[in-house]
Amino acid sequence: MIAPPQALIAEVTHRCPMHCVYCSNPLEMQSADRELSTDAWTAIIRDAAGLGCFHLHLTGGEPLSRKDVEQLVRVARDAGLYTNLITSGLGLSRARLKDLVAAGLDHIQLSFQDSVEETANAIGGARAHAYKLRVASWIREHRLAFTVNAVVHRHNLDRLQEFIGLAEQLNADKLEIANVQYYGWAFRNRDYLMPTRAQVAKSLPIVVAAQERLKGKMRIDFVLPDYYAKYPKPCMGGWGRKLILIDPAGRVMPCHAAGVIPGLQFENAQDKPLRFIWEQSDAFQCFRGDEWMQEPCRSCERKGIDFGGCRCQAFLLTGDATATDPTCSKAPERSAVDEAVSKANRDDQLNQLPRGDWVYRIDPVMRA
Amino acid sequence: MKPPGLAERPALKPGCRLSPASNPESLLLIPEGALRLHGPGRRILELCDGQHTLADVIDQLQMEFPSAEANRIAGEVVTYLSRLHEKGAIEFL
């Protein structure tokens, strides 16, 4: 028996007014004309609740680029789901926020690109920072959980203390500090985003001290940069173990990046029940268990902890999705990570901002 | 963190709520996921409405579970709510 997923991650659109250089959306995005209708999402949300999910994460792109988010929140709440909106804040007015809360929204995650406006806007490719500050103050007019998402990297990690201060000032319940993970657009811009070893080392005690100081007031979650770690992350809590993700066109995937792996066929949520897709489809079955694993994973005592790391990262760095995630110190192809890390620690040119040569995330292009 | 006082009023924090009673499983839904509720867990949390004091919650539980030792109930309620306070699911008003 395969336990049901805990959460449905609904990537309702890939459209976004931000152009963050570290966006984790795929380079090949789904265009607006392929997006599922409100009715289709309604059916999917109910199906997910029936399957046993208890959380719905509405994300994108910018989910608020769609006009029906309030409706989807209401559907989810009626189906017994806990709803979380992951947003840049753009597309949110004071009135719309009120409607979302009335519809039953439980939790909102608001992203910030930096504590300093100028760099924040340079990273996000949009003049968004000042507006986000206003959105944060509106959020605190309501009784819902408020998380600040802070993505950190080479160009803002030195201001981590100030970033934590910003989240405190905004009165967030939780601060999620996530080092950039190198997928999608972030993989394209990896050399410019990767912090130095010294930056990472300096950041750790800052996080620990803040966690201690703010205990009971603001929780701080911290995602380590896995290129600097000894062991890989248990990506998505393991392939097809905890999370089910549906992209804007209805493709059902084990994670947002899985589309990069060649040969995987994703079922569409409009064609088949989620239970079948979760329990039986090839895309979910292929990396469950340990039969697909190579050595050293298969005989590793950590295989039940990290499941061999991330399949998408293994593919991106080695060309083989069944390889050991190269961020593992035991990985035969660890050199792929070591080279990137070594470059990040050698090349001072990478510190320059603004950069003319990094690739801003664009909006999906409509089909002709 | 200091232990909560008996006159303080425990409440679920914003963004934390009990799963609907119609659900087959009793859960405390929180931003990070869900906590499975066992034994009197759900009953304790139902009383954490920001109106009842910690003393009220203990009294009520002692009344509803007369066969259990009163001191033990008091201790367990305080431990339970302190733990959830640390997890960010409970606040004391």
Image (tube, helix red, strand yellow):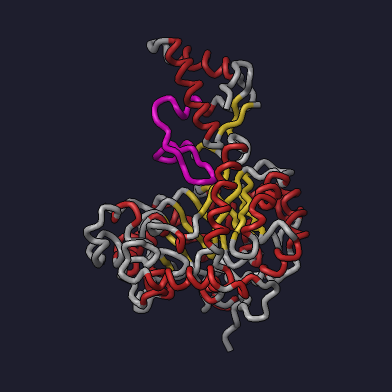
- At 62% across and 27% down in the image, what residue appears? B92
Task: Name the residue at 60% across, 82% down.
Answer: A365
Instruction: State the image coordinates of residue B65 (x, y, percent, origin top left).
Output: 42, 15
Q: Position of residue A146 (x, y in %)?
A: 64, 47
Query: Residue at position x 69%, y 44% from top?
Result: A168
Q: Is residue A282 visible?
A: no
- Compared to residue A367, the image places residue A132 above or below, namely above
Position of A245 compared to A360: left or right? left
Residue B12 visible in the snapshot: yes
Q: Between residues A208 and A44, which one lies in front from this camera angle?
A: A208
Closer to the camera in the image, B81 or A194: A194
Residue A145: name its quadrant: top right
Count up the numbered dots.
0
The quadrant in which the C terminus of chain A is found is bottom right
Q: Position of residue A210 (x, y in %)?
A: 61, 42
* Magenta stretch bounds: B21-44
* Residue A47 or residue B88, whichever sits in front: B88
Say if A315 sits above or below A230 in the image: below
On screen, residue B12 versus residue A231, left or right, reads right
Tell me: residue A120, above or below residue B53. Answer: below
Res A264 → quadrant = bottom left
Residue B27 inside the magenta-drawn segment? yes
Q: Is residue B17 magenta?
A: no
Task: Kindly identify the residue that appears in the image at 56 percent across and 46 percent down.
Answer: A205
Q: Residue furthest bottom?
A: A368
Q: Nearer the viewer, residue B25 or B71?
A: B71
